[in-house]
Amino acid sequence: METKIITLPKFEDPRGNLSFIEEENHIPFKIERTYWIYDVPGGQVRGGHAFKEQREFIVALSGSFDVVVDDGTSKQMFSLNRSYCGLYIPCGFWRQMENFSTNALAVVLSSTKFTKSDYIRDYTDFLDFRKEYEKQRI
Ligand code: TYD
């Protein structure tokens, strides 16, 4: 599955709405870890790296922010601002989170446990990684 917005189930109720996510059903991986980003000061940017293995699903549980996803050739921006929609990102994409609103809460479901060596933090290394990745896909 490519990078895409996935709309989650939503039970609308006068008492308040309810949404949920099931692993390997609404999202195409098993959840090994969940983390969240919050209290982001205005103008700050998070992310700015790629993962070799980690696949992820990002939801703006509260507030809004943008996720810029880069495959080494072109960039795509996704605005997240609904708690029943999330962005699925496969491994091998450079991604950055920016334009956080006040009180934004970003929850990230990850297919892997935290592994420092899975990060690609240098953009030139990322482009090399993409070259290899594209070669393997041919
Ligand atoms: P990082 O992923 O680098 O955040 P960002 O790319 O948004 O700046 O994580 C920041 C720090 O938190 C880094 O030192 C690693 C640590 N960390 C964990 O220990 N476990 C985790 O699950 C995550 C996501 C980060």
Image (tube, grey):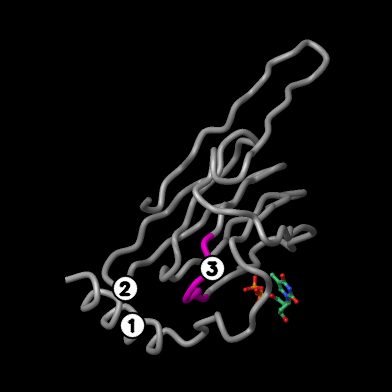
Which mark sits nearer the N-terminus, 2 or 3? Answer: 3
Closer mark to the observer between disc 2 and disc 3: 3
Q: On the rendered image, what quadrant is the C terminus found in?
A: bottom left
Q: SS class of the residue under badge 3? A: loop
**80 versus 112 height, above or below:** above
Residue displayed at 54% across by 39% down: 25
Q: SS class of the residue under badge 1? A: helix
Residue positioned most to the top: 14
Q: Which residue is mark 3?
A: 54
Which mark sits nearer the N-terminus, 1 or 2? Answer: 2
Residue displayed at 50% across by 74% down: 51
Which mark sits nearer the N-terminus, 1 or 3? Answer: 3
Q: Which residue is mark 2?
A: 72
User: Residue 127: which disc?
Assistant: 1
Answer with left or right where residue 89 lies relative to residue 20. Answer: left
The image quarter containing residue 46 is: bottom right
Residue displayed at 36% across by 53% down: 2
Q: SS class of the residue under badge 2? A: loop
**Residue contact at pointers 1 and 2, CB within 8 angstroms:** yes
**Residue contact at pointers 1 and 3, CB within 8 angstroms:** no
Foreground: 84 or 22? Answer: 22
The three-letter amino acid code for the residue at tag 2 is Gly
- Give the quadrant of ligand 1: bottom right
Tally the marks.
3
C-alpha separation, residue under disc 1 versus residue under disc 2: 6 Å
The three-letter amino acid code for the residue at tag 3 is Gln
**Residue 99 screen position, x and y as percent:** 59, 56
Is residue 51 rendered magenta in the image? yes
**Residue 98 screen position, x and y as percent:** 57, 61
What stretch of residues is rendered in magenta?
49-55
**Residue 37 screen position, x and y as percent:** 73, 60
